[in-house]
Amino acid sequence: MKIRCVVAGCLLAGLSLSAAAWEPSGDVSVIVAYKAGSGTDTGARLLSAKAEKYVGHTLVIKNLPGADGKIGWTNLVKAKPDGMTIGFINLPTFTTLAVLPDSPFKVADVIPLCNHLTETAVVVVKADSPYKTLTELVAAAKDKKLRCSTNGVEASNHTAAQLLARSADFSYKAVPYGGTADQLLALRQNEVDFTCAKVADIAQLIKGDTPEVRVLGVFSPQRLSSLPEVPTLGELGYYDKWYGSARALVLPKGTAQEVVDFYEDAFRKTMTDPDVIYAHIQAGLELDFKDSKELAALIKEQEEFCRDVVSTLYQKPAK
Amino acid sequence: METLALMGAGFVAALTPLNILAMLLSTFIGVCLGCLPGLSAAMGVALLLPITFGMGPATGLIVLGGIYCGAIFGGSISAILIHTPGTPASAATAIEGYQLTLQGRAAKALTVACFASFCGGLLSCISLYFFSPLLAELALKFKSPEYFWLSLFGLTIIAGVASKSLLKGLISGMLGLLISTIGMDPMEGVERFMLGVNTLYNGIDVTCALIGLFSFSQVLILAEKRITAHREVTKVRDRFGLSLKEIRRLSPTIVRSWLIGNIIGILPGAGASIACFMGYNEAKRFSKHKEEFGKGSIEGVAGSEAANNAVTGGSLIPTLTLGIPGESVTAVLMGGLIIHGLQPGPALFTEHADMTYTFFAGFVLIQFCMLFLGLLGCRGFACISKLSDAILIPSIFVLCVVGSYAIHNNLVEVVIMMLFGVLGYLVRKFDLNAPAIVLGLILGPIGERGLRRSLLLSDGDPSILFSTPLCWMLIALCVLGVCSHLFMSRLEHRLQRTQLSAPQSD
């Protein structure tokens, strides 16, 4: 055992000496914790295909779905930190799981690389809903218990609704559906009164002359450039911080700094390529490059949010 | 008029040499994948999705469609020849198809499957073209109470698939429902029977369970017997082809299955695996040759295969128009469509009409590729059933393990598959009903969510379940499903008795 360790150590030392500027020695595995064809997967594949030009090798997507990301991310943090495995994480889901006491991975187990996509949360009603503004919706919600569809129990869009309800001080009935598509269908079918979703999910529903849904507010400190007429929640006196989801690239803990630098540079070039930007617009994805430092700050912020805010969010208010 | 011009332009765009090559190749790959137990259509599309990224949007979309249709048909080949449905969509095909193989009529069964798949697929294109907006509207009307009734209606099929004993069929169905409760509770988020295994978070994977119940149990059954060097019964002795008389006999079944498959396809959540059982069941109910069922009926094969291929066109309708995939394959397919620039929504028929109609045209042409490849390749595919058990057992074993691992790249699911294999073995020994377990497993979550969500919405008032005309329609279907079966089986008994007392003609 000891000999093997020594040999491995020598090999590692030899490798790091010989590699002046690091670059991958072969195909790079990209761990995606959701199944092929899912939203996360679609975005990951688009970026990976485009990044090959700058990485210099093929990026092979490895789908390891299950338990809402837990299985894939457990594999990601356990992967050999040799730069041959990178992975996508979803925020805040990753931090939500990581702050749980029995989580197989912690936030410190990954090295932030760069952010890929950002999706801000929004409050939506059906286009023919009697509630024209968020203020009207809140007033009605204080009067009687409104119904809100979510994408699952304590899932991202449930958290958004909960943030709104807490900050506007009303109670509502959260009805969980299987996913975002079902949740939005329930709104369009009039089965619920309002819902919270991400801006990309409803992009198709607000287009054209006869939009199907109406956006009442955005979970952001500033108005969104894509929805300039929609007020922020903060403007109306409700939750005033950003809430939404982000998809980012990370490396397993222990990866050398030069590897991080290599990928950060490669992905920066990829995400500023006009061709890539156009492909994202075509696919309806909101490209939002953040470097490793900015991403680290975002992950830290999300970790605190999950630990301090979300944990108390679902407790029944004491009356 | 403008629409017609767009449709025509679609065919012109789809008929480039490159696209035709893409259709043939992708359909061939699809059939091969579908043939292999465990490699489902969804997995096939997912596996080959990255390859299409380098192609033009039209070619890429056609390739995805080809794999989809090919895989759904391909599943029937292994279902017929080795009693292991290649995809869940062909589970019902195995019932009659394998009986025909045992009688040495494998080629006939394959021809029927191919012909029925072609008809089902082609007819489903008609609705894809013309009823798209109408049918999409119907699916939009399905709310939580309707889903509850829909799943209940689905469960009445158990009465149909349980041919030997209704009681054992019900026990099997209940077992399936019980197993379907494993995993995260959909309404409260509480873990149920997970035993600390993360993989069970989203419940038992149906494909994984199917591989175990149908394929792995087959390995156990085969291994139990002494290995014979050559399997005599499965030699393809008969000729390929169908007579005009047979086509005439099959047509009503195919049309019925097309309608069933189409509607099932459009409804989200219910996919080809349910459609094949419904198609089979209705074929049996209306058949003039009921006595053949369970002993190798070509109508049974046609009923199941036409229905599952009719799902393909049907399930594309809500996927394309509403962005709600009708089943797992189209969920994967939707990811591919978006990457190739086809955002689901009304813009498909205005802004992107040229691309949409090219895809539709490709979908029509793929059906012809499937018929061509199916009839041409049947003889080649038929070779599988000539294999000795000594080769077959390890091959199926390997495919089961690889297939169940490949679904999510997860070793735990291989263990789950094997457990289901043992369950499948016991099920056969105790004469229980494996398809009924699968029905319970698939329909359980749909029904549970529908019922509990309805009651949550109505504050526990059950009258919500009877609140819409659509609910009543589905209730009527449920009652009809149960009663017609009881009536038919009584009629069957009486017919059998009169037949027994009368002198046998053959």
Image (cartoon, helix red, strand yellow):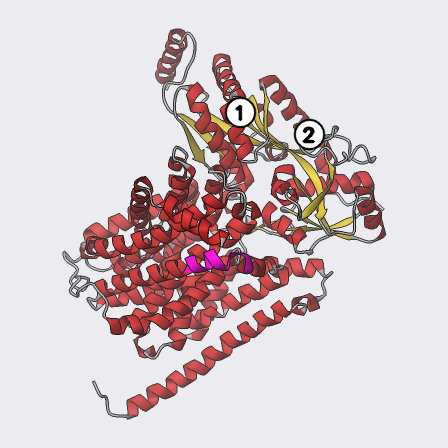
Is the residue marked by circle 1 packed among few (<14), some (14-19), or many (20+) residues within 10 Å?
Answer: many
Q: Which residue is mark 2?
A: A225
Q: Secondary structure at mark 1?
A: strand
Above or below for A271 versus B494: above
Tell me if residue B296 can be seen. no
Percent x, y of residue B32:
29, 48
Q: State the image quarter where residue B165 is shown.
A: bottom left
In this view of the protein, which residue sits in the foreground, A189 or B498? A189
The single residue placed furthest to the front in the displayed view is B1
- Badges 1 and 2: C-beta atoms under 8 Å apart? no
The chain identifier of the residue carrying mark 2 reads: A
In this view of the protein, which residue sits in the foreground, B215 or B80? B80
In this view of the protein, which residue sits in the foreground, B303 or A160? B303
Q: Which residue is mark 1?
A: A250
Magenta part, dominant SS:
helix
Query: Which amino acid, by three-letter code, is at mark 1?
Result: Val
In this view of the protein, which residue sits in the foreground, B8 or A241? B8
Above or below for A95 versus B307: above
The C terminus of chain B is located in which quarter?
bottom left
| Picture residue at 38% right of the left edge, 59% below the top | B122
Query: Which amino acid, by three-letter code, is at mark 2?
Result: Ser
Tell me if residue A154 can be seen. yes
Percent x, y of residue B397:
29, 49
Is A299 magenta? The answer is no
Q: Secondary structure at mark 2?
A: loop
1 vs 2, front mark: 2
Query: In the rendered view, does B414 fall on the left or right side of A180?
Result: left
Residue B432: give its label.
none
Percent x, y of residue B195:
53, 47
Query: Magenta region: which residues?
Result: B124-134
Percent x, y of residue B412:
43, 43
